[in-house]
Amino acid sequence: MSRWRHEFASTFHEFYAMTGRTVPPSFVPLTEDDARETTREMLLPLCQKLGPTRVGKALGCDEKTVRNARDETSTLRIDLLVNALGLDPLALDGFLLRAGRRSVPAECIGAADGDALCNLLKVSHLLSMALSDQRTPGALDDAELMEIPSDALDICARAIAAMQTRQSALRTGSN
């Protein structure tokens, strides 16, 4: 989606959200140019990190196909796009964003509220301890961040994502 169309849609929805009204997610039909631009935005970081050859192998195509899609001279097939999830679990979020959606791990859908709350409280406690220390009060330094287990942060992020997805579904009446 062109930048101005995305910014307009975001501003429009922010305005209506402030009024307290329920606004359905914006959806602008996808054009081929939009698909190519969104695919490029997905492929650029993958190619920078892994190179077009490795990305192509992971997607199931050759590096020329990846380069052409990255350079917006061709459109990547849907089956190859979906294979990008093997490299980045959020690879398709650029497409989902067009409809006001985002991807969430399947295990987060319908997660028990008690489990989510428990995980959030664990991370909240760890953050609280780190922020209230004498060494760097009110700040989280690198050493303190590294003391928080990464799996605890992952669990917390998934719990928040699950609650956001559920809340969004309740607001739109699609639960």
Image (spheres, rainbow, N blue to C red):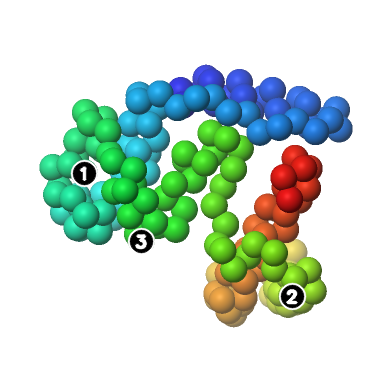
Q: Residues within 10 Å of mark 1 (few under 14, many from 20)?
A: many
Q: Is residue 173 above or below residue 88?
A: above
Work out which residue is located at the far right of the displayed protein and give it.
20
The image quadrant that residue 17 belongs to is top right
Image check: 170 left or right of 2?
right
Could one spot residue 107 in this view of the protein?
Answer: yes
Q: Which residue shows up at 74% across the image and 75% down it?
A: 115
- Return the residue at label 2: 115
x and y, in percent, of residue 35 in the image: 37, 31
Marks 2 and 3 sit apart, C-alpha to C-alpha, by: 27 Å
| Residue matched to label 3 | 86
Q: Which residue is mark 1?
A: 66
Amino acid beneath label 3: Gly
Q: Is residue 152 above or below residue 21?
A: below
**Mark 3 / mark 1, whichever is N-terminal:** 1
Secondary element at image label 1: helix
- For numbered disc 2, what is the local secondary structure? helix
**Residue 151, percent from left and from top:** 56, 76
